[in-house]
Image (cartoon, rainbow, N blue to C red):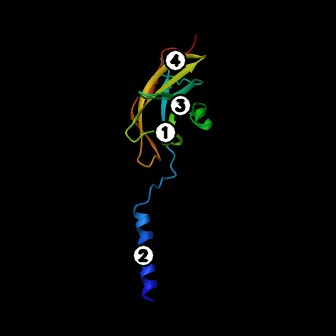
Amino acid sequence: MFHKIKLIVFFTILLISSFLIADCLCTKTFMNIGVRVLDAYDNPVNDLHVETRFINEVETSSFEVESLLRDYHKYFPGQYIIIGDESSQKVSVEGDTLLFTGKKDDKIVFQQQYIVKSDSCHCHVYKVTGPEIISIENTAE
């Protein structure tokens, strides 16, 4: 009987300690970092091809946001997603520099740097620096 009690206590402590030191529990909230692109007259600029690149001393790698988010500007004029939680595993806790580029007709109309970081569990991405609005002079030629 005493042996069974010791086993029950042992497994109870093991179970409780596993909850206390659980690796990570992410919320189901999906976060994105976005920007609004406006022309010289403060009109939303749509139909840009945008690209986000990680920049560091060793390498530069690019990625595209999920296809649903890539077309975000079609539902919210002039708004584009720079990076979202789907890329949180690629982002460091200390912070990474991103280069966000917008093109129209294969011509670069803006390039903007952002610094983003992830939480310690790599569940979400957060903007450290970078503008919320990018103003561009002219996209028509």
Secondary structure found at label 4 = strand
- Residue 117 in the image: state x and y as whole percent: 41, 39
Q: Where does label 3 land, which residue?
A: 80
Q: Using the image, tell me which numbered label, if any, was put on residue 122.
A: none
Mark 2 and mark 4: Cα distance apart in space = 64 Å
Tell me whether circle 2 and circle 1 mark residues in contact (CB < 8 Å): no
Between disc 3 and disc 2, the foreground one is: 2
Compute the Cα span from label 3 to label 4.
14 Å
For badge 2, the amino acid type reads: Phe
Amino acid type at mark 1: Lys
Amino acid under disc 4 = Val
- Specify which label sits upstream in the sequence, 1 or 3: 3
Q: Nearer the viewer, residue 40 or 33?
A: 33
- Do tag 1 and tag 3 residues touch (Cβ < 8 Å)? no
Q: Secondary structure at mark 3?
A: strand
Where residue 109 is drawn, which disc sits there? 4
Label located before the other in sequence (3 or 2) = 2
**Mark 2 Cα-neighbour bin, 10 Å: few <14, some 14–19, many ≥20:** few
| Crowd around label 4: few <14 · some 14–19 · many ≥20 (10 Å) | some
Circle 2 residue: 10
Residue under numbered circle 1: 90
Marks 4 and 3: in contact by CB < 8 Å?
no
Q: In the visual, does 83 lie left or right of 92?
A: right
Give the CA distance from mark 2 to mark 1.
39 Å
Q: Indicate the secondary structure of the residue bearing disc 1.
A: helix
Q: Callout 3 environment at 10 Å: few (<14), some (14 to 19), or many (20+)?
A: many
Residue located at (60% from left, 24% from top):
47
Q: Give the quarter of the figure containing the N terminus.
A: bottom left
